[in-house]
Image: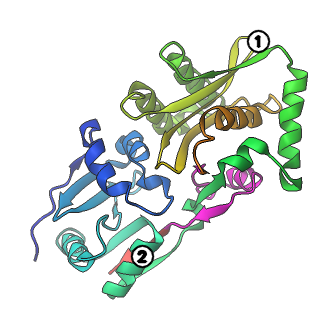
Amino acid sequence: MSERLLFRSIELKDKELLNSYLKKESGFLADHNFGNLYMWRFKYCTEFAVYNDYLYIKMMSPESDVHFYFLPFGKKEGYKDALRILIDEGKRDHDGKMWFCSSSSWQKELADSTFDGFNLIPSRDFADYIYTSESLIELKGKKLHRKKNHLNRFIKDNEGKWIYEDLDEYNAEEFYSFQLRWADMHGSENFEDETLAVKILLDNRRELNVKGGLIRLEGQVIAMTLGTEFSRDVFDVNIEKALPDINGAYQIINNEFAKRNLSSYKYINREEDMGIDGLRQAKLSYCPEFLGDAYEGWYC
């Protein structure tokens, strides 16, 4: 048996350390973004360990109290030893049976080629939707014609009544207030974890380099969005909310935020749909460039 991995909770001071591994990732999974890991750390009891120059991450399901793991992050040479260390953890703590999630293609391939016992399959519900920034800014083409129409209708119907604002020290509290309002409209008890995650993003916006934007209509906030950088080429939209009864509210915040803040990125990750049909249809309607594969399954 190998030495035990010393897992501990993620803190802000760990950003540089974790990014030294995560930003070498060639994939697009939002779960491999420090900002995402940090904002959801309480819901999933997220912990990490670094050993022999590999990063290990484990979480806990809030529904079942079952631990689940990411495959290690680090150089491909020596990956067999890194996996063996993680498998030894499973033998000690879980009778050799471990659940893995949010694995990228290269991690899955290395795991499959190194050890028997991995059964990792694509997870459609947790595949990230990846768009080009150009497509979300320009909304060109027949497939995005309806989105363009909703956007133009909002602009025409509300001429002179709306403004866009970037997140700053003066309006940060209004982002949180809008999250509370939106959650209350949809059953706040179902969005307690998300509301806490929004607060974490806002409270640590400077350290996490959070970008955000809101739309005011006649002075009142009707939509907002928040996100963090994944890499020089990819931006991760963590949160997007709008009042459902205002036609074009989602389209205007999506477009204005991308146009004003994200044109320097090649891709925009709008994250997964979690198997929610309405969310899936909404994300598909923007015609993603591709879906970022996420693999999950057991090792036993």
| First to last magenta residue range | 267-294
Which of 148/103 is in front? 148
Q: Residue at x 29, y 69 (%)?
A: 75
> At numbered mark 1, what does the secondary structure look like: helix, strand or loop?
loop
Residue 181's spot in the image, x, y percent? Answer: 61, 23
For residue 251, which quarter of the picture? top right
Q: Say above or below: 68 vs 2.
A: above
- For residue 219, side relative to residue 47 (left or right): right
Q: Label 1 amino acid?
A: Glu
The residue that mark 2 highlights is: 108
Q: Can you identify the residue that label 1 sits on?
A: 218
Q: CA distance from mark 1 to mark 2?
A: 51 Å
Query: Image point 58% across, 56% down: which residue?
Result: 274
Q: Is residue 157 visible?
A: yes
The amino acid sitting under disc 2 is: Lys
Q: Earlier in the sequence, mark 1 or mark 2?
A: 2
293 magenta-colored: yes
